[in-house]
């Protein structure tokens, strides 16, 4: 019988191959951000806003306090008047408030400003039920002209009888009369009108 076996046997050696091991993957979904971290981030913002509001409140209160206590019009006069009292936010150059000039008589408040021999007297009262007709005044005395005043409707001119500069301002609550001595320039009166503002009650 013929020998059918191959003349030789080739032996296969299986050498170990160093293959990279697969990296285990974490399929777990990322944990949601904790509520504590969000709250901790919000706290500094809230504290900053609260601090800002407090500072704004203190600043406004301080301004009101200083403005109120630096007013030349005594508190008792403002209380007795019962209407908004107006005073210039900026006094014309060269003029100063006459200390102690503020007074109230029959519900009319008055005070004065001076520059050397030049004097300006301001008198104020509650707007009467029938306020003065400024248009009629302008027709009667053409020297009176409309003045752009933040406080209200205003006119200024020269009093025909005395030759003195005069102005009238009508606000929602107060009727203001301003009269100067003959030496007071008309532009000083106009400047005064444009800077009249109500004092804190």
Image (spheres, rainbow, N blue to C red):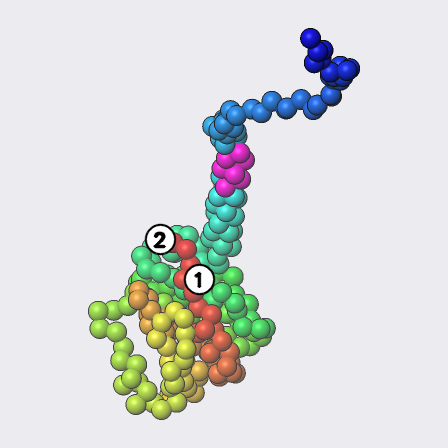
Is residue 46 found inside the magenta-colored segment of the image? Answer: yes
Q: Which residue is mark 2?
A: 79
Extreme front residue here?
1
Q: Which residue is mark 1?
A: 102
- Residue 17 at x, y percent in the picture: 73, 21
Instruction: Say what secondary structure mark 2 lies in.
Output: helix
Left or right of 15 on screen, residue 178: left
Which of the labelled discs sits on residue 128, or is there none?
none
Quarter of the rendering containing residue 132:
bottom left
* Closer-to-camera residue (10/192): 10
Is residue 91 found inside the magenta-colored segment of the image? Answer: no
- Residue 95 at x, y percent in the picture: 55, 71
Residue located 44% across and 55% down the image:
74
- Disc on the earlier residue, 1 or 2: 2
Which span of residues is magenta-colored? 41-49
- Residue 43 at x, y percent in the picture: 51, 33
- Residue 193 at x, y percent in the picture: 44, 74
Q: Work out whether residue 112 can be spotted.
A: no
> Neighbour class for label 2 at 10 Å: few (<14), some, many (≥20)?
few
Depicted 38 relative to depicted 124: above or below: above
Residue located 33% across and 72% down the image:
170
């Amino acid at each position: 019988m013929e020998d059918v076996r191959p003349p030789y046997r080739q032996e296969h050696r299986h050498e170990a191959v160093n293959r990279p091991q697969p990296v285990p993957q974490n399929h777990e979904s990322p944990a949601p951000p904790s509520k504590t971290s969000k709250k901790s981030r919000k706290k500094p913002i809230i504290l900053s806003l609260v601090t800002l509001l407090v500072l704004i409140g203190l600043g406004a209160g301080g301004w009101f306090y200083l403005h109120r206590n630096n007013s030349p019009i005594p508190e008792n006069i403002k209380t007795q008047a019962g209407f908004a009292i107006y005073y210039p936010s900026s006094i014309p150059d060269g003029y100063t408030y006459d200390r102690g000039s503020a007074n109230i008589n029959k519900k009319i408040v008055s005070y004065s400003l001076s520059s050397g021999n030049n004097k300006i007297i301001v008198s104020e009262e509650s707007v009467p039920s029938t306020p003065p007709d400024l248009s009629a005044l302008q027709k009667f005395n053409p020297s009176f002209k409309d003045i752009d005043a933040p406080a209200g409707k205003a006119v200024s001119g020269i009093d025909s009888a005395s030759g003195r500069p005069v102005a009238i301002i009508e606000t929602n609550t107060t009727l203001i009369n301003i009269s100067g001595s003959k030496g007071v320039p008309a532009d000083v009166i106009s400047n005064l009108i444009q800077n009249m503002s109500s004092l804190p009650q």
